[in-house]
Amino acid sequence: MASRLTEISLDCHDPDRLADFWAGVLGWVVIHREPGLVEIGPDGRDDADLLEAVRSGPVAPTLFLAQVPEDKVAKNRVHFDVSPVDVSQDEEVERILALGATRADIGQSGEESWVVLADPEGNEFCVLRSLAPEHFSL
């Protein structure tokens, strides 16, 4: 059997602010909060239920936001791609901007099918084309 991806950690200055931002973007909930560390995920399953789910198959990983003193100094080596599922890409970009994101210029040509944004601490991520039925088909 292979390992499972269960958690993604993101270093930041303000875990509370970033957790609230990403929970808003993804529609997730805060699972655990303590000074300097916040965990968010798609649902609030208890540990026993989550353990059983992980053992039986892939699950959505949780996101740990951990406070660190260092600043972000370069483009992310790993980034998130999010796909709107019930609105257009433009509507989702506007919603995420209202949550605190900013537009990011990483040298894109303007012809891409995705939009590059940055979270409140400057971590780049992409909003891909919408998967909503009226905007996407195979």
Image (spheres, rainbow, N blue to C red):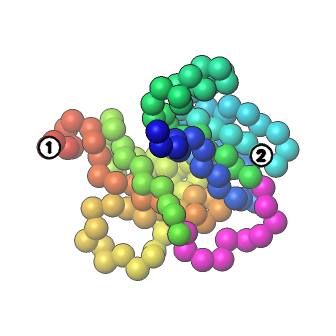
Q: Which of these two is toward me, 27 or 99?
A: 27
| Residue furthest front in the image | 1
Labels 1 and 2 touching (C-beta < 8 A): no
Label drawn at residue 68 = none
User: What residue is pinned by disc 2?
Assistant: 37
Q: Is residue 34 left or right of residue 107?
A: right
User: Residue shown at 55%/69% (left/top)?
Assistant: 76
Above or below residue 68? Residue 34 is: above
Residue at 40% in and 80% down? 107
Binning the other alpha carbons within 10 Å of mark 2 as few (below 14), some (14 to 19) or many (20 upward) gives some
Counting the numbered discs, the total is 2
Q: Earlier in the sequence, mark 1 or mark 2?
A: 2
Q: Amino acid at mark 1?
A: Leu
Disc 1 from disc 2: Cα separation: 40 Å
SS for callout 2 = strand
Residue sitting at x 58%, y 63%? 123
**Which residue is most to the right?**
35
Q: Secondary structure at mark 1?
A: loop
Q: Position of residue 51 (x, y in %)?
A: 60, 26
Query: Can residue 17 be spotted in the picture?
Result: no
Residue 34, by quadrant, is top right
24, above or below 13, in the image: above
Report which residue position mark 1 lands on: 138
Amino acid of disc 2: Leu
- Magenta segment boundaries in residue numbering: 67-76
In the picture provided, is 16 more to the left or to the right than 82? right
Decide if residue 82 is in sight here: yes
